[in-house]
Structures are given as structure tokens and as C-alpha cells.
Amino acid sequence: MSGAATDGAPAFKVIAFYTGKSDLAHISFVHEANRWFPTMAAKHHFSYEATDDWGKLNASFLAGYRVVLFLDTRPEDPAQRAAFRDYMEHGGAWLGFHFAAFALTPSAFPQNWDWYHDQFLGSGQYVSNTWRPTSAVLRVVTPGHPATRGLPATFASAPNEWYRWEKDLRTNPSIQILLAIDAASFPLGTGPKPHEIWHEGYYPVAWTNRNYRMIYVNMGHNDMDYEHRTNRELSSTFASEAQSKFILQALLWLGGRTP
């Protein structure tokens, strides 16, 4: 477990869960997040810890934390899933990244958790993604939300692999979309497969569910040098100043602070 100490009692405590075993781009993000969040914790007076022990996802452990992060995956054990649902339904807060919302049947991560994917996230199954990881122009959809306060109307994201979802979040009254891909981004992706390049459409990339204290962000997949087999990191999720401001403000809001 890693963490960052702050002077005096922290305003709130954050626990980040991760797996860090599949897909080098996700592992790269996990390592980056576990460097960036402690730095933010020291500056903004909260505490940050991270663990790959999903067995700690239980009621007694979660009771010590104001905000839970899923950096790359979701819990698979039924008891852990039940503990997380109970935590969220009784006032807990959550920030999830990229692959934490992935579900596809059939795959190694099937859609076998209806509450999480259909009700909590509202997105349903994963459908497709752009490739390669590229920067997008993001539009602030809800400028009045604390997480988007002070952001420009549009801004350039860090490179990312962008997901498309089964369900149209615009039709769900519980979902409040915070950021979406702006049309200026198109064509988005470089292929080589034609379906990996988006030319039109509406794609939310960050949203909250009004019934819970939560925010999901689609960011969290760094660009990697797979082609030359060096596996070198080619991008950083926290390289975009505006995007990083959004992530920090989202976390502060979840922790009960007004950014």
C-alpha cells in the first residue's frame, strides 16, 4: 500500500483499488495515478492510499474512507461487489477510470453485474473504441457542476483510447453528463481499422449519477509503443492541465470540498 501524509488531520481519506496485471497501457496509468494523487493529496490536504488487495473491499475497511477509486478494474467477488454497493447506497463516494466500466459478454470481463453497469454507471456494455490513443477536444456539457468549474468551454485532453457504450446516457434522467467529445475532434483515432476511427456521433466521457456521489471518467489509457515492441510510454494521462484540473476538482467534490 502506498500513500501520502499531510500536515494535521486530512480533510478526507481516499482509497484507490487497482489490479495492474493486464494491458500495459492500463498498468502505465495506474503507476502514473499512484504518483500524481499523492502529490495532489499533499497540496490539497486529503490522504491517498492505494492497494491491489481487493479483499479489503469490505464494510469495515471502507468505513475508514470518504472516497473509493477504481483505477483499472472492478471487483469480481460477489461479497466485494455487495460491500461496494452497500457503501455507495449509504453515502460513500466513488471515482472510476476508463477500464473500471468495461464489460462485454463474452469476454474475460462479462456483463454479469447489472446494478453496477446498468443502474450505477448507466452505460451498459462496452461496444467499441477508437485506436490509436489520441487527444480529443472535450466539451464541458455541465459548466455549473463543481467538477467543471473554471474550465474552458472546450479543451484538449491527454491522449486516450475512447469508449463507446451500449446505452445512450442522454436518455437516462439519473445521469448528468459532464464532458463529451466535441465535434471538432472528428475524425478521432488513426486506425488502421476503419471502425477504430470515429467521424461523427455523441460520446460522453465523464458523467455522474444523481442518485449516488460518483463520477466516472473515460480517461486512463496511455499511448504505448506496441508497434516497435519497446512498450515505451508515449503519453501521460495527466499531461493536460485542464483535464487534470477536472479530475482534481471531481475528487475534491466527492470528498465534500468545494473546489
Image (cartoon, helix red, strand yellow):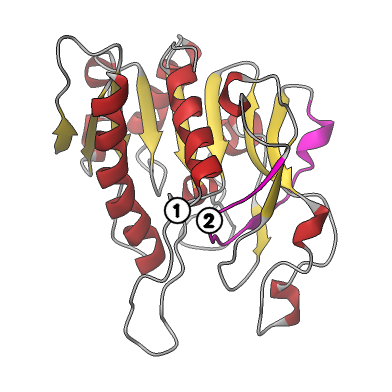
Which residue appears at 67% of the width and 34% of the height? Answer: 122
Above or below residue 26? Residue 86 is: above
Q: Which of 189 and 83 is in front in this view?
A: 189
Q: What residue type is labelled 1?
A: Ala
Residue contact at pointers 2 and 1, CB within 8 angstroms: yes
Mark 2 highlights which residue?
Answer: 158
Mark 1 highlights which residue?
Answer: 239
Above or below residue 192? Residue 101 is: above
The reply, left or right, for residue 164 in relation to residue 66 is right
Where residue 250 appears, x then y in whole percent? 50, 27
Label 2 neighbour load within 10 Å: few <14, some 14-19, many 20+ = many
Q: Is residue 106 magenta?
A: no
Above or below residue 107? Residue 75 is: above
Numbered disc 2: secondary structure: loop
Where residue 95 appears, x then y in whole percent? 46, 32
Which residue appears at 54% of the width and 51% of the height? Answer: 102
Q: In which quarter of the image is residue 170?
A: top right
The reply, left or right, for residue 30 in relation to residue 92 is left
Q: Can residue 23 be seen in this view?
A: no
Segment tinted magenta in the rendering: 154-172
